[in-house]
Amino acid sequence: MHWHGIHNLGTPYSDGTSEITQCALGSLQSQVYRFLAYPPGTHFYHAHKSMIVADGASGMIIVTPNSSSTQEPTYDEERQVFLKDWWRATSDQQVVGLLSVPFVWVGSPDSILVNGKAIWFQCAQGGQYFNNSNYCMPSCTNASSSLETISVTAGKTYRLRIVNAGSLVIMNVAFEDHNLTVIEADGTMINPFVVDSLDLSPGQRYSVLLEANQDPAAYWMRVTVRSRNYPNVTGLAVLQYTGANSTVSTGFPGNVLWNDTGYGISQEGMMQTQDPSLYPEATALRVNTSSVRRFFLVTTQAKVFSTGALVWAVNNISSNAVTTLFEPLITMAYKAAKEGGWPVDIEGTVDLPEYPSTIFDYTKPLLEGPGQFVGSEAPLVLKLVKDEVVELVFQNTRALNNVSELHSWHSHGHSVWVVGTGIGIFDPVKDVQNFNLVNPLLRDKFDLFPFGWTAIRLVANNPGAWLFHEHVLPHVVMGLNFEIITQPNELGTPPTGATTCIENSLEESNASTDSATSITPIPSTPSASPPSATSSTSNLTSSVPPQGSHGFRPAMNVVLAVLVFSCTTVFDLFIN
């Protein structure tokens, strides 16, 4: 189980990433995760083995800041909006298709869940199976009663914490007749700005302020798909004013068109960190640009010559660490560094090249560059020394079908500064001069737009082995990832759950010895935390809304418990 957005400072074995920081948790096995609730903000947890998260196994994490923080805006109440794309097919069926020859794509989701509820479009009014009890539940005929209701009171301001916990689609969220003021992105408080709809790629989290300033009534919230032409895939909820008629209008909010890339680029460009000096990562903005090591990472799609399998690659290397490693990478790195110092070779892995082996016009078809076949397949690692600052410039290209897709990258164990973006080919002279090193957005999930590039700056302040991957999960399974390894010789002894899986698997129902961090010390309060912060008793709530996804396969396995932590609190979480 991965704690998406939590840095796991000093507890790298608790990151919950199968094949990277631990062995996968098997049937009837249990495990305790111990970590510091940091950074504050809106995060979520989800299974991190293959594509299991597509079946559910996820929920929201809220880390509240210390009382002395001055960044939090004022509002009356808050609500949670947890979004997931949902398929009738299981994740196992999807993975089999992705790894098969011939290749079988996962296809469009059957619906988008809002807090676990949705109506499959074929069961809604106008759908092929509307009012057909052989396929659809009777409640599908009454849309508003089957969907999530977000209750508000006229005159109040609400903080909506919105999470895209999906595995494939970028989502656009809009509320009928209501604007949204964006105030937080991935745990970072930003300079507020107003939008009429909000884009979220998989893994991204935002806080927005919604003012209940319209005539008391029932209004639609609608979620549509961006970057992929799936017009029938939507999510709906009702914004219900207290005491008002519950009949919703026949119109919907005006979501952005699926192929309007400019809107997403504009939204990204408006995001600026309120006060970068409050974050320990600010050291990365103060170093001289000429002294920063830069990696130019070109994402390409390719085929394996020997099998014809379709893969994704970084600098023409497809990373298969999440599908092939016999032992978690963190223990491999720990043992190698203890014996040979750091940095050192790690058997079976390949170092991430600073540049691709083939330089070409990245806006042209791949056949004019590296060709259709991948250079190699291996666990791809970026070895860093503690506190080293690096720049990673991601360059998008065309896939083999000549389409340039939006890629959405996530950094485990770190938040990174998004210092520059652009359309076209990155220019290491001209574009670097325009980097924002004053108030760039600090986040752990960033987008790489079609035919574009994105530059991030990262400080390696967290020893461990951390997955850095595309968060469109089919692409991860197909090899679009690498691993950042920082100073593993400084780690504590690997616990039972992180050691060689066949020889030392977790014991059944033995929570006391299965602790993923029972040996690793908990660090002191991070320097970015307000000085009055203290470790306190947990404020843990569990709320599972009724499940209401109607169609062929109920989404009963979607977990929607909301975990609410106080910043700097140390937590033990028992997973069974």
Image (cartoon, rainbow, N blue to C red):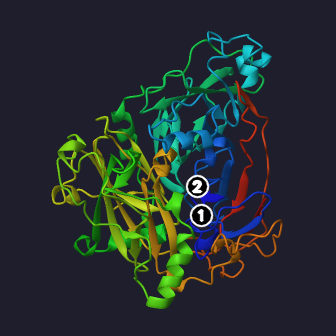
Amino acid type assigned to the residue bearing label 1 in the image: Ser
**Residue at image x 57%, y 23%?**
176
Say which of 437 and 9 sits in front: 9
Q: Foreground residue, 232 or 143?
A: 232
Please provide percent x and percent y for residue 163: 59, 44
Residue 121 placement (x, y as % from top left): 61, 19
Q: Could you say where residue 513 lies in the image, as x and y percent from the top left?
A: 78, 76
Answer above or below: position of 360 versus 121: below
Can see residue 527?
A: no
Q: Is residue 433 left or right of residue 127?
A: left
- The local secondary structure at tag 1 comes to loop
Label drawn at residue 14: none
User: Which quarter of the picture shows residue 544?
Assistant: top right
Report whether residue 85 is seen: yes
Q: In x, y percent, where is residue 331? A: 56, 77
On screen, residue 326 versus residue 475, left or right, reads right
Looking at the rendered structure, the secondary structure element under dot 2 is: loop
